[in-house]
Image: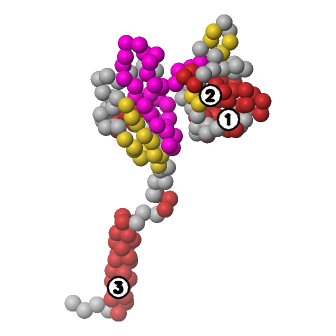
Amino acid sequence: MAFSPQEKRGIFILSFCLILFLGVVYLLNFFPPKSAVQDDVSLIVQIAGQVENPGVYRVTEGTRVFELIELAGGAKEAAYLENLNLASPLYDGQKVIIPEKREDTASFSLPLPPTLEEGVLKSDNSSKININTASASELQALPGIGEVLARRIVEYRTQNGPFRSPEDLKQVRGIGEKRARDLESYLTF
């Protein structure tokens, strides 16, 4: 069967288009376009204490404390999770310590909120509050921090990541130079 020159040309063009199409499909499977590649931000966090596999883990941004515990093989039977905010998002460089259950729960090593004694907030190293993990109600125990300002602090760190220093506090609407300086002795970061 002989093909005319126009038929040969049509077959050649059709074959070329088919090969080109298959080549593009093949390449896209091995080299997806940049917009299709997930640009997940990696965080490096450490987990220690009462978990099956303590260590340093690489997780994606948005990972929560409970997910890190699962990644580390789960909490041991002796783990005390009641004072941890398991829904808290992780941040780069964070160390999560899972304490051990004790009869005296005040003796584990996580920072506890400051205590009130006769209406005055006591500040010593054992009772500093972690600005990056404290709940809004715990933040209200700080001098000069009411319900609205506590909510703003939590919203700010949720949207912008953890506070690294007292200077970062000034980014929260309602906290100026003086208030940030006054709070410094009550906070850990």
> The residue under label 2 is which amino acid type?
Leu
The residue to which callout 2 is attached is 187
Element on which disc 1 rests: helix
The residue to which callout 1 is attached is 166
Q: Residue 12 carries which label?
A: 3
Give how far across and how far down residue 95 sits, in percent: 46, 37
Location of the N terminus (image quadrant): bottom left
Q: Distance between the residues labelled 3 and 1?
A: 71 Å
Give how far across and how far down residue 181 sits, in percent: 73, 31
Whether the magenta-drawn stretch holds residue 172 is answered as no
Give the extent of the magenta segment.
85-114
Element on which disc 3 rests: helix
Residue at 36 percent across and 23 percent down: it is 100
Q: Earlier along the polypeptide chain: callout 3 or callout 2?
A: 3
The image shows residue 73, relative to residue 12, as above or below, that is above
Location of the C terminus (image quadrant): top right
Element on which disc 2 rests: strand
